[in-house]
Image (cartoon, rainbow, N blue to C red):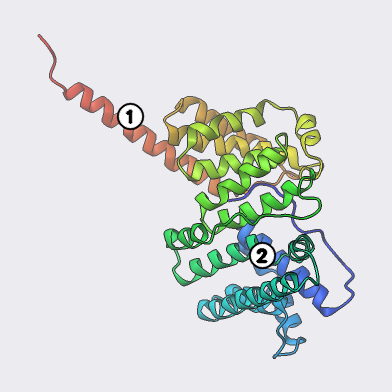
Amino acid sequence: MCTALPPPRTERRFVSIWHELIYVCRKVHFWWYVRSDRHRAMTYRSRLERLLRKTPQRCIALCRAEGLALLYLLKGQRALAIRHRAREIRLIERLRALFRESVESGKQSRREALATLAKSGDDWTTLRARRAILSELKAPGSVDQAEKLILDSWNLVSLNTSDANSSRDHIALIRHGNELHEARCYAAALPWLERAHRVAPRCPVAIYDRANTLHMLDRDKEAEPLLRGLLRATVEELRQGCPDSCPDSSPRSLQLDVHFLLFLVLLDSGGPRDEAFVLAAKHLRLRRRGLHSLWSARKVRAEISELRRKWKKGSADQLTRSLDAPKKD
């Protein structure tokens, strides 16, 4: 699950049908894979279907292949989603081969080719993420297969663009890390999020996403100090830490979810249970209109109730065992 990265900017005017199709695909991808909000993603289904009808059927445009993969995913037709996702990957590989030939022939430099691919969203990291998504579609729930695919294809190619060391570069690193995270390839996602944290050590989104991925890898002892630091910071400190990733409402929304994530981290790591449930209660108390959370209030309450029952049952079992234990004379 990803943090409160802002959704793609809302657009009202489009220069072509391809421009609008790319925009809708980004929206669906964001809500389905980044925020895991399938209901929100489904709101774009009819619009996406209408746009795809207007495009040529034999078109080899990447955005059309991605659009068809997303449309059939929304329709629940997994076989067709797999078919078009695989076609999208083949098209990306073909495009990369053309750029490789261009570099080898001296028509453009390697830096220019990588910058162009990164700008269009067809770079190596995107290709790896698409392969992970395809693997998860083929074997739903089989995380190991997708993660192995990512790790086997790992190489040293990175975002080698002209502004690779700029302060905005970490946004792209977070995006790629979150795509891998949403594909449940947590071990593959962590290096990207750690690099984003190194590039922008004060960025609250990079800190939160790194902590979240560490939690999914059962490295809660490392995640806990990161989350406590976010709670200690003021809203203004969070906003100044990274204005690009923290619009006006995001710092408070991020801290809202930090309370609940830290609650989960403390319970999983065997930390102070009383403090954990206080954090969960505060998360519910702080929820209000205008603050966005990755978790619905209903899901949060259900999770808290379930974990409280398990905690009480575990405490009761432990007390029973201690009472039944033989006592020394």
Q: Looking at the rendering, which quadrant does residue 241 occupy? A: top right
Point 61% across, 74% down: residue: 89
The residue singled out by tag 2 in the image is 29
Q: What element carries label 1?
A: helix
Kind of residue at disc 1: Ser
In the image, 27 versus 175, the foreground residue is 175
Give coordinates of residue 233: x percent, y percent. Answer: 71, 27
Q: Can residue 287 be seen at all in this image of the molecule?
A: no
276 horizontally vs 37: left or right:
left
Point 73% across, 49% down: residue: 171
The circle on residue 251 is: none
Q: Residues within 10 Å of mark 1 (few under 14, many from 20)?
A: few
Q: Most extreme residue toward the front, as rendered?
A: 105
Give coordinates of residue 107: x percent, y percent. Answer: 81, 72
Q: Distance between the residues labelled 1 and 2?
A: 43 Å
The circle on residue 315 is: 1
Q: Most extreme residue toward the left, as rendered?
A: 329
Give coordinates of residue 79: x percent, y percent. Answer: 51, 80
Q: Earlier in the sequence, mark 1 or mark 2?
A: 2
Q: Looking at the rendering, which quadrant does residue 287 occupy? A: top right
